[in-house]
Image (cartoon, rainbow, N blue to C red):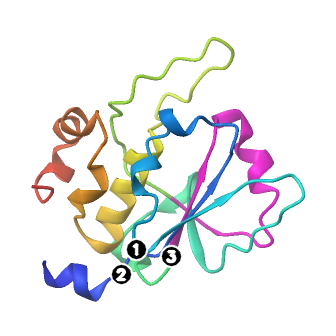
Amino acid sequence: MSASHLEAPLDILIFRDPREMLAKCSLTPLRGRSGIRFVDYHPERTLDPGERILLHVEGDELTSADAHHGLLLIDCAWRRVPTLQRRLTRAPLLRRLPPLVTAYPRKSKTFADPGAGLASIEALYAAVHLLWGSRPELLDGYRGREAFLAANPWLLARAR
């Protein structure tokens, strides 16, 4: 195990919409891992995100300087993000990822997906890579792993 793994434990909170099918969720293989906590959304539940970073297109670019903060992921359909975000008791820090190419086969018959959208596992992996270093085990179980890393070679350099 590398020194970066010992120096920087994961601090990830995933606020998940239970309407999403677990079988299709790219984050499901991460359940039970140390440093990753899942909380299911409920309309009457609020969630204190603490001093965490939420990946958001309107934020400043995420860098290793943000490594002292935890990470918050909202895992739901794009159209439901505002609904879940309203249940947060305080505003998280907003940061955006650098441009990345998804390997996730997205297609909605009802709503348009954002052009730069990523699978949740892809966004999580890239954010962790920038904050705390390479954690290739996060992509274990992700069918798009090889295609995602090949399409984003700056992540591939230290992912093996």
Q: Please state the horizontal and vertical placement of residue 115, each as a whole percent of the image.
A: 49, 28
Residue farthest toward the right in the current orientation of the protein = 44
Mark 1: few, some, or many residues within 10 Å (few <14, many ≥20)?
few
Give the amino acid type for the residue marked by disc 2 in the picture. Answer: Pro
Residue 152, quarter of the rendered image:
top left
SS at mark 3 in the image: strand
Give the amino acid type for the residue marked by disc 3 in the picture. Answer: Gly
What span is colored magenta in the figure? 70-95
Which residue is depicted at the point 77% across and 65% down?
88
Give the amino acid type for the residue marked by disc 1 in the picture. Answer: Ser
Q: Please state the horizontal and vertical placement of residue 81, each as a whole percent of the image.
A: 70, 45
Screen quadrant of the C terminus: bottom left
User: How far, Cα to Cα, is label 1 from label 2?
Assistant: 8 Å
Residue 103, quarter of the rendered image:
top left
91 sits left or right of 5 in the view: right
Which residue is depicted at the point 31% across and 40% down?
142
The label on residue 70 is 3
The label on residue 9 is 2
Mark 3: few, some, or many residues within 10 Å (few <14, many ≥20)?
many
150 sits left or right of 87 in the view: left
Residue at label 1? 34
Tell me which label, 3 or 2, sits earlier in the chain.
Answer: 2
